[in-house]
Image (cartoon, coloured by chain):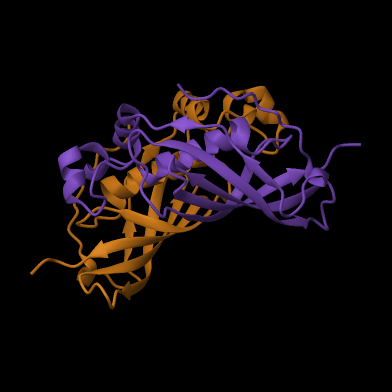
Chain colours: A orange, B purple
Amino acid sequence: MNEAVERTGVLYLEDLHPGQRFTSGLYHMDEDRIKAFATEFDPQPFHLDKSAAQASVFRGLAASAWHTAAVTMYLLVTSGLPLANGIIGLGGEIAWPKPTRPGDTLRVESEILEIRCSRSKPQQGIVIVRSTTLNQDAEPVYVFTAKILVFRRTS
Amino acid sequence: MNEAVERTGVLYLEDLHPGQRFTSGLYHMDEDRIKAFATEFDPQPFHLDKSAAQASVFRGLAASAWHTAAVTMYLLVTSGLPLANGIIGLGGEIAWPKPTRPGDTLRVESEILEIRCSRSKPQQGIVIVRSTTLNQDAEPVYVFTAKILVFRRTS
């Protein structure tokens, strides 16, 4: 079972500063769910079949990179990035340094890199957050440097 | 039902050139599936509840951005980017210029931007591909500029 963490959504734009760090709960990557996600969204042999995966560049069954990305979002939303207005991503940069494997337990560590306040819309800003998804051996499997829309408290 | 398109995986590194374009089949975004995906991976009110979504910055129910990303991968794998060794993404840049809505029909248009041949591994290269996901009104909802690992034919 994945750790149940209540969303604590308490932070507004004025509560954030560069260097601030957050750590999510944990998520277990189940082999059946890896195959189900791949069947629906990324039906390639190295995500579906052990023998094919062994012969591929992945050298073993690997989760779809988009499954890792989606699980990272789950961890951010439920525990890893407690923004009061939710996590509204505009885009960013992504990388998958290593595959995610069946049985892996993932967590996400995030750091605020930069805060860009809007001149035209003083109630909002863009926050640059780097989220690194790590497996149980503390190896990064996914890095998402996101532009997130964040609001100030309404006073 | 989504258009069934057989994977035609015929292209190797030496078959690709900058400016080459590809168009995927179509994918219908179903409201129940949008909510199911959000429940599993992105449980935020604006992806789950019409009233909450109406009051949010999205001004109506929106698919999780990661759902749009995952559907884009499905379209690329099944029809949109016929690479012989599959689509092995190393990372890239992403942006969501507009939300995806229930009832939208998506397609993906891709263009090869650049080909970087490996000096140390002559059998492979990195191909930079920009994939733009469009809705039925030809509005871009997602742009993914990807670094993809592509192999040469084994001779």
Q: Is residue B107 visible?
A: yes
Q: How many marks?
A: 0
Q: Residue at x 63, y 32 (%)?
A: A60
> Residue A32, image x and y in percent?
47, 23
Residue A136 visible in the snapshot: no
Q: Is residue B32 left or right of residue A113?
A: left
**Residue furthest bottom as drawn:** A119
Q: Residue at x 20, y 64 (%)?
A: A12
Residue B80 image point, x, y percent: 61, 37
Residue situated in front as seen by the camera: B67 or A2: B67
- Return the residue found at the far front: B137
Looking at the rendering, in which quadrant would you find the N terminus of chain A? top left
Asked if residue B56 is positioned above or below residue A26 in the image, the reply reads below
A30 or A9, which lies in front?
Answer: A9
Relative height, residue A49 to residue A67 (above, below): above
Query: What residue sits 44% from the left and 29% below the top?
Result: A30
Q: Nearer the viewer, residue B83 or B119?
A: B83
Query: Between residues B127 and B62, which one lies in front from this camera angle?
Result: B62
Q: Is residue A129 above or below residue A97?
A: below
Name the residue at the left extreme. Answer: A155
Whole-percent x, y for residue B14 in the image: 83, 46
Q: Which quadrant, please, contains the C terminus of chain A?
A: bottom left
Point 60% across, 25% down: residue: B5
In the shown orientation, is residue B19 left or right of residue B45?
right
Q: Determine whether, in the image, residue B109 is placed left or right of residue A5.
A: right
Percent position of residue B12, x then y: 78, 40
